[in-house]
Image (cartoon, rainbow, N blue to C red):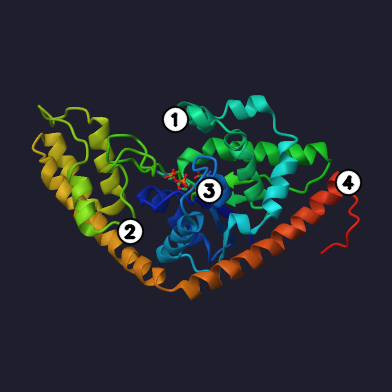
Amino acid sequence: METVVSGIRSTGHLHLGNYFGAIKNFVKMQHQHRCYFFIADYHSLTTHPTPDDLYRNVRQVLIEYLAAGIDPEVATLYIQSDVPEVAELYLLLNMNAYKGELERCTSFKDKVRTQPDNVNAGLLTYPVLMAADIIIHKATKVPVGKDQEQHMEMARTFANRFNRLYKTECFPPPYAYNFDEALVKVPGLDGSTKMGKSGAEGNAIFLADEPAVIRKKVMRATTDSGPSQPGEPVSQPIQNLFDLMGIVSDQGTLTHYQDAYKQGTIRYGDMKKQLAEDMIAFTAPVRERILAIDADENYLRKVARMGAEKARESARQTIREVREIIGFASALPVN
Ligand code: ADP
Ligand code: TRP
């Protein structure tokens, strides 16, 4: 049985990109492998240094994980900061992570551009913490969206470097995973190629959105003036709508609108109405579960406690091994 790890930052509600890029696979994999899924609250501090209410954000992601179908009795579902061993491994890996390689990371360069007043060391070492998250459980499979490809490459680099440096085989190299298919990238409604929490207003459809909100966002999605003649190439915003339809609608619906585009008879308004209804049909049951779980504080506390215990047990073993490999002579009895 292989070990699987993946995480989502506690920076807001989960959207269709998170679902189809990541969580859908978490749900599928939980019965086949030893799975660890977590809420990356340490990571959220790199972009949200003083969240109004850290626990509220963490709690929301926990609720949405559960509502989307993660079974906490089967998978280990935990909060990153409940496992301080991750922070220790991060510190140790940082000693062998170089400024040059970290500065070349695309997500770091993006953040330097988008938050120039807060280019903190946590942002620079973000991929090191992510590597620690993964290898603390010696995971080999990491279900993530396409945007995480480079981070995964770096995680492998750090794992392999540790092995080489200390002449050990402690860490198996971890790989991004999507059931032998290409990694997923769900586009946004604002014409951009990625649906994201930090995109423009209305870019993302959240699992918790009410039907009326979904209709409004989809009807406002960016389009173009339409094909002026049959066979015209498809612009990015329209391709995004087709891609979204490919994800939430049935094949017949998608083909119908693709044919209409080719013939130059498409009406974007009709297509958007259909897309909105298909998104609502998909999200409505998840939203119902979100509301039900939200009302059950005892259950949430129980899930978090159970996850923390299971995750710590696995993390403690790895840290013990790592300390021995590096050569720390602990004066304290091993706990
Ligand atoms: P966001 O990018 O919205 O801030 P996160 O960075 O916390 O969300 O992403 C958590 C997971 O969801 C990662 O595995 C990431 O690859 C995936 N993901 C996020 N947005 C998308 C998207 N638009 N398409 C595919 N996967 C996505
Ligand atoms: N970097 C990921 C993202 O932004 C979140 C994340 C943190 C993660 N640690 C991880 C994903 C470990 C997979 C495994 O989406």
Q: Is mark 1 within 8 Å of ligand 1?
A: no
- How far apart are the alpha carbons under marks 3 and 1? 29 Å
Q: Of tags 3 and 2, which is closer to the observer?
A: 2
Label 4 vs 1, first from the N-terminus: 1
Dot 1 surroundings within 10 Å: few (below 14), some, or many (20 or more)? few
Q: Which residue does the numbered mark 4 point to in the structure image? A: 327
Q: Which residue does the numbered mark 2 point to in the structure image? A: 208
Label 4 vs 2, first from the N-terminus: 2
**Which image quadrant is residue 193 in?**
top left
Q: Which residue is at 88% across, 46% downward? A: 327
Q: Secondary structure at mark 4?
A: loop
Q: Nearer the viewer, residue 186 or 129?
A: 129
> In the displayed structure, does residue 214 sit left or right of residue 159?
left
Disc 2 + disc 1, Cβ < 8 Å: no
Q: Nearer the viewer, residue 14 or 266?
A: 14
Q: Which residue does the numbered mark 1 point to in the structure image? A: 114
Q: Position of residue 204 (x, y in %)?
A: 32, 46
Q: Which residue does the numbered mark 3 point to in the structure image? A: 177
Seen in the picture, residue 270 relative to 316 is either above or below; the reply is above
Disc 4 + disc 1, Cβ < 8 Å: no
Dot 3 surroundings within 10 Å: few (below 14), some, or many (20 or more)? many
